[in-house]
């Protein structure tokens, strides 16, 4: 791992979209994943591609049980266990654990409650409940030496806990799933359109932009637009909505925004640690 990753909190969104989601977060020679929605091979290939070939994975935090967030979990768990000589914990809520698809359960599931605060190496990690049509979905907040990152995807609406979470972040991986006009005019069947735009579905560009505007805190420096629909969105539309929100908030000069991709990882984003 590059030496800079030892002084910084480093984030690489390895995959983001309906065919797979996975984010690596590292600092001080330790690292974690949020979600395992791509294969173990792709995890390593994408870490290699962004210059993190030896990136450690000490734990995996799962947001919910949909396949695009867990389909690589079983094989990744086995490979990490073989490499480390011991099982690597996969943290998730009890509802998520009970509803994992057949054949995707990792070797070491650690169930967590919504009030739990977890510690892995230098990281303090806690779940935040979100509204989505699964058993017990969560966003994850990862803090290290005064710097905080949140992975907030797969939610149908903004809630007070989500707003509170976002207000304290330095970096947000935030869902901008669909453009409403594209969704309504697109080829999806009506029941699926209703599910996506419902209160337990996914955020539209407009909803996500409003959430970004209303929750913008003084520490925020980076936003990665996540879980963009290939059929019902375009990066240009999502980026325009996010940038308009930042302009409204007077924060366009201090907050960088980029779109995540299902096909390739984002370059690593490094945030200097505050050391308390």
Image (cartoon, grey):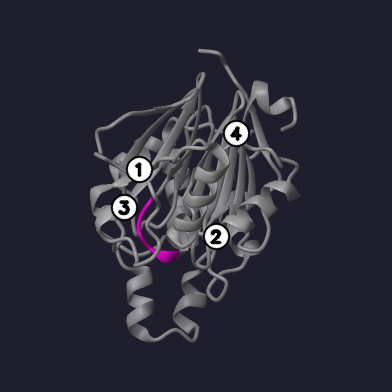
The residue labelled by disc 3 is: 137
Report, in whole angstroms, how far the alpha carbon at label 2 lies from the one at label 3: 19 Å
Label 4 Cα neighbours within 10 Å, binned few <14 / some 14-19 / many ≥20: some
Q: Give the main secondary structure of the magenta stretch.
A: loop
* Residue sitting at x 57%, y 72%: 230
Residue 72 sits above or below residue 271 on the image: below
Callout 4–callout 2 Cβ contact below 8 Å? no
Q: Nearer the viewer, mark 1 or mark 2?
A: 2
First of labels 3, 1 by sequence position: 3
Q: Where residue 12 sits: x, y (%)?
A: 63, 44
Tell me: 144 left or right of 134: right
SS category of the residue bearing label 3: loop
Of 264 and 121, nearer the camera is 121
First of labels 1, 4 by sequence position: 1
* Residue sitting at x 25%, y 39%: 114
Q: In the picture, residue 98 is in which quadrant?
A: bottom left
Residue 196 sits above or below residue 216 on the image: below
The residue labelled by disc 4 is: 221
The residue labelled by disc 1 is: 162
Q: Where residue 144 sits: x, y (%)?
A: 50, 24
First of labels 1, 2 by sequence position: 2
Q: Is residue 250 visible?
A: no
Of 62 and 210, nearer the camera is 62
Q: Nearer the viewer, mark 3 or mark 1?
A: 3
**The N terminus is located in which quarter?**
top right
Label 3 Cα neighbours within 10 Å, binned few <14 / some 14-19 / many ≥20: many
Report, in whole angstroms, how far the alpha carbon at label 3 lies from the one at label 1: 12 Å
């Amino acid at each position: 791992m590059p030496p800079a990753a030892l002084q910084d909190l480093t984030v690489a969104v390895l995959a983001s979209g309906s065919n797979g989601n996975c984010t690596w977060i590292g600092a001080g020679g330790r690292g974690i994943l949020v979600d395992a929605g791509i294969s173990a091979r792709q995890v390593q290939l994408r870490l290699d591609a962004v210059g993190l070939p030896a990136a450690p994975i000490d734990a995996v935090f799962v947001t919910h049980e949909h396949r695009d967030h867990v389909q690589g979990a079983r094989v990744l768990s086995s490979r990490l266990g073989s490499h480390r000589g011991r099982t690597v914990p996969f943290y998730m809520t009890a509802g998520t654990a009970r509803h994992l698809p057949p054949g995707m359960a990792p070797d070491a599931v650690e169930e967590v409650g919504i009030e739990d605060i977890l510690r892995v190496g230098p990281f303090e990690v806690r779940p935040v409940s979100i509204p989505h049509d699964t058993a017990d979905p969560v966003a994850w907040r990862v803090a290290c030496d005064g710097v905080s990152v949140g992975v907030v995807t797969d939610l149908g609406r903004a809630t007070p806990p989500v707003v509170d979470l976002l207000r304290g972040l330095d970096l947000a991986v935030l869902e901008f799933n669909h453009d409403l006009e594209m969704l309504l005019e697109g080829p999806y069947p009506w029941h699926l359109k209703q599910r996506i735009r419902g209160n337990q579905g996914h955020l539209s560009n407009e909803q996500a932009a409003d959430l970004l505007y209303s929750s913008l805190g003084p520490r925020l420096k980076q936003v990665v637009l996540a879980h963009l629909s290939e059929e019902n969105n375009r990066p240009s539309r999502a980026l325009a909505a996010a940038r308009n929100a930042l302009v409204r908030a007077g924060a366009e000069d201090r907050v960088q925004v980029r779109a995540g991709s299902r096909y390739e990882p984002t370059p690593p984003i490094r945030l200097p640690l505050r050391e308390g």
